[in-house]
Image (cartoon, rainbow, N blue to C red):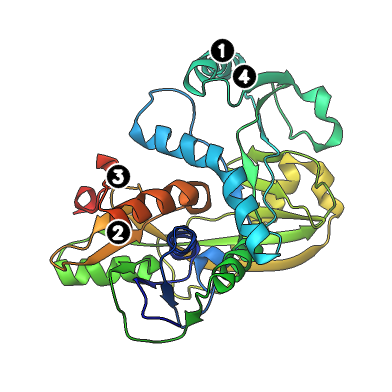
Amino acid sequence: MATPDVTILGAGIFGLSIGWECARRGAQVQLIDPRGAGGGASGGVVGALAPHTPERWNAKKEFQLQSLLMAGAFWSGVEEASGLASGYGRTGRLQPVADERALDLARERAQQAARLWRGEAEWRVVPASGFGPWAPRSPSGWLIHDTLSARIDPHRACLSLAGALAARGAGIAAEGRPEGPVIHATGYEGLEALSRELGRPVGTGVKGQAALLRLDARDQPQLYADGLHVVPHDDGTVAIGSTTERSFTRPDTTDEQVEELIRRATDAVPLLAEAPVLATWAGVRPRARSRAPMLGPYPGRPGEFIANGGFKIGFGMAPKVAQVMADLVLEGRDAIPDDFRVEASL
């Protein structure tokens, strides 16, 4: 491999996506991660790419909208380069409506979506009866159906990105010497290391547990009910997630909490009750203090950058994060929203 133009530390979704965007623009890229592609939290099972509510619009929601709209072309390009499926599909999402008050709010948001999403997607209020046994229990008999949400298979998507990078001559090494600009996409360990370095908390890790069931609902929208994501994948599985654990002793093991997830999911969607459990998963997601992705120059380290903190929204934000980080590192153009800047978490 030629001398790299960019070194990326970390081969999770942010590191891989930024690497792909840099390589696609002609840069020589090296990635360094002892765990390989998707070896940390990005190698999970859930894969819900879902928008924030269409109201009280801000730069974060606009950034997310643009990223979700970019996702189809982004993942199509990755799959074409790698020859590996990512599991991406813009299949939409259903959410139950609890009562008349929630129904009124949902209809207000439908009007907001028509304006804020600029005709690119819809937020509709529909009868639950229209989705048969797949519909989650809804006390009001109504569901919110948005057509912006998408699904992805996180592990396969990471492998697809790694394959696309390999096709451009960029490998993932367990160790190496960083050369050129360095981008730290190092997950929760990186946030905790930065906190120690600066002497104040800038972010931490939040553990999540999830389950994968055998049920072929691949043509159905994902569900969000009782605080859970239920995501049908294109391989005949359904993922359920996830817990939110700020205190934990073991980062990668499951316990009785995943059993409670499955119970709650089957209460919300009785169709899941007979679906066998294929696997359970646990990992620690990086959460910046600002709760938004942390992007930009590394404090006190010229020529080094940070791309971290995509807590629960990393895959949905990845196409746009890759674009703005490649703009910054390769071309010196800074289009990072103020709320996403590293200093917002300091």
Of circles 4 and 3, the one toward us is: 3
Q: Are marks 2 and 4 in contact (CB under 8 Å)?
A: no
Of circles 3 and 1, the one toward us is: 3
Q: Secondary structure at mark 3?
A: loop
Q: Amino acid at mark 1?
A: Asp
Residue annotated with mark 3 = 336
The residue at 70%/55% (across/down) is 87
Reply above or below: 297 against 341.
Answer: below
Q: Secondary structure at mark 4?
A: loop
Place of residue 344 in the rendered image (x, y in percent of width and height, measured from the top left)? 22, 47
Separation (CA) of disc 4 from disc 3: 39 Å
Separation (CA) of disc 2 from disc 3: 12 Å
Residue annotated with mark 1 = 104
Separation (CA) of disc 1 from disc 4: 9 Å
Q: Residues within 10 Å of mark 4 (few under 14, many from 20)?
A: few
Q: Which mark is residue 283?
A: none
Of circles 1 and 4, the one toward us is: 1
Where is the C terminus found, in terms of image quarters?
bottom left
Separation (CA) of disc 1 from disc 2: 45 Å
Q: Between disc 2 and disc 3, whose residue precedes?
A: 2
